[in-house]
Amino acid sequence: MITTRSRLADGREILYFDLDPVPRTASDTRDLPSTTTHSRARFDPLLGEWVVLASHRQTRTFLPPADLCPLCPSTPQRATEIPESDYQVAVFENRFPSLSSIHANLPATVEGSPLTPLRDGFGRCEVVCFTSTHDSSFAQLDQRRARLLVDVWAHRSAELATLDDIGQVFCFENHGEEIGVTLSHPHGQIYAYPFVTPRVVKIAANVAQYRKANGSNLFGDILAAERAAGIRVVAVNEEWTAFVPPFARWPYEVQLYPHRRVADIPELDDAQRDAFAHLYLDVLGRFAHRFDTPMPYVAAWNQAPTPKSGVPRDDWWLHLQLFSIRRAAGKLKYLAGSESGMQVFISDTTPETIAAELREVR
């Protein structure tokens, strides 16, 4: 993988990732104002969780037509976020980030609320463009490009984890307008949070408790049980298993686990990276062809917190969670009272049925 670094007109960093040497000399010709953010994080003392406020994102680009897509390559007639006339994979700092790249001098608590701690929303948000082809998707990439993207995730995860005050790096993709995607060009995102997310905090605590009680790894025991039972396995190869978790919350949910434990994407070796690219494209293809139209989905990498986070990493088992809000043809699962109000998910499907349906998709 060949990495080329450059800067956009407003100072944001852009990186190009190529499989073969390609000259990357184009410059951003736009007249852009400096990026300003107003990210703040407020701590909910009842739930023990940080909430990020990013009011500046109200002005971000929303569902532009294809000929105005900011993620397509630049042309002589129109400059975009990517100055080059073509690219394989491009990563750049988000113009409308949820997190701020600079620290702000703020009071310790929210005005008028001494029980609500306040901190700046420091962190980094990056956009990962999977391909220069606008009318495509991750599921339509070839295996070579999918493997390149695994290397890109590893590169960015390793580098972002070294930044001061970063507790967790989260690589993800939102796919489909029903999910809330505002740009249809194939892309994902990476967030470098200044804290460890609630999901990872809770899982890490349960994994530690399970280790103490049983002397083994909770992730590993779940994987072993699913591989042995087989009834919820969707696809498998020599390095990875994709299965519907028996406790699935979403109508269609698949988790992909490597057979050999690693804590994060950078720790994956070449064999694991190759095998993941193959299996992931397989599963995405099943999501794309289960119904008459491709399912909207979220793909979420569950990586260990950074070494400096203070949260133990030794038992963490990297995995990818892929889920869709579609519950049937033409029907979506809405998070209503029980889910949104009490965080108690009520599923309209059964994991065993969903696994069987996905296995039948060709």
Image (cartoon, helix red, strand yellow):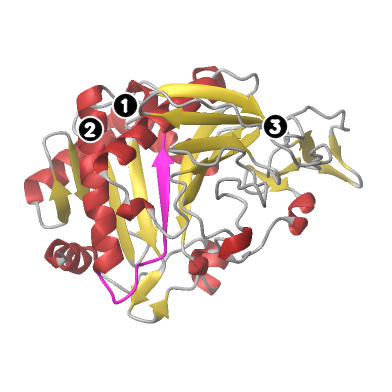
Q: Which residues are magenta?
A: 290-303
Quick one: label 2, few (<14), some, or many (20+) residues within 10 Å? some
Residue at image position (26%, 49%) is 281
Q: Quick one: 271 or 332, which is closer to the camera?
A: 271
- Going by the numbered disc 2, the residue's amino acid type is Asp
Q: What is the CA distance from the residue labelled 1 to the residue labelled 3?
A: 46 Å
Nearer mark to the viewer, of 1 and 3:
3
Taking the view exactly as shown, the residue that stands out farthest to the right is 112
Look at mark 1 in the image and give the residue it sits on. 212
Circle nearer the N terminus (1, 3): 3
Look at mark 3 in the image and give the residue it sits on. 12
Q: Give the quadrant of the N terminus.
A: top left
Residue 274 % position (x, y): 23, 32
Query: Does residue 326 sit above or below 35 in this rendering?
Result: below
Give yes or no for residue 137 being in the magenta stretch. no
Residue 34 % position (x, y): 82, 37
- Going by the numbered disc 3, the residue's amino acid type is Arg
Residue 194 % position (x, y): 64, 31
Nearer mark to the viewer, of 2 and 3:
3
Look at mark 2 in the image and give the residue it sits on. 274
Query: Label 3's element?
Result: loop
Circle nearer the N terminus (2, 3): 3
Query: Label 2's element?
Result: helix
